[in-house]
Image (cartoon, rainbow, N blue to C red):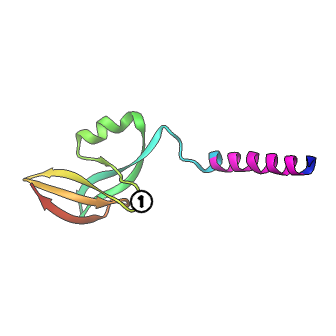
Amino acid sequence: MNVLKLTLGTALVFASLSTSAFAAPADKLNVCHRTDSDGIRFHVINIPAAALSDHRAHGDIVAPPAGSTAGARVGGGQIYVLDFQCNLVYIATE
């Protein structure tokens, strides 16, 4: 019985350490950075959370979670819909 408790306890500690060791820092996030250069309109950058408002002010958006999309209003009645890697999926109109 003591061996089982030790093994289970060790597994829980290992799982806890593994999760925290590979988790992204809470104060950083990925954004789709607007470039409008060379046909590449957005690319992923990792920024401090405190800088998000500055990035949003010039058209950057928070990168959506894997498997989903997000929209970025770019003017002229267009909304660029991006995937989680900031690739243009399609252009919608308002």
What is the count of numbered marks?
1
Quarter of the figure with the C terminus? bottom left
Report which residue position mark 1 lands on: 66
Is residue 13 a member of the stretch shown in magenta?
Answer: yes
Look at the numbered disc 1 and give the secondary structure of its residue: loop
The structure residue drawn at horizontal position 36% and vertical position 52%, both measured from the top left corner, is 63
Q: Is residue 30 left or right of residue 41?
A: right
Residue furthest top as drawn = 50
Residue 72 percent across, percent down from the top left: 22, 52
Amino acid beneath label 1: Ala
Seen in the picture, residue 81 relative to 60 is either above or below; the reply is: below
In this view of the protein, can residue 39 be seen by the observer?
A: no
Q: Is residue 42 left or right of residue 44?
A: left
Q: Which residues are magenta?
A: 4-19
64 or 85, which is in the foreground?
Answer: 64
Residue, far front: 1
Asked whether 39 or 20 is in front, the reply is 20
| Residue 26, image x, y percentages | 50, 39
| Rendering coords of residue 18 (x, y %) | 68, 50
Residue at (53% x, 42% y) in the render: 25
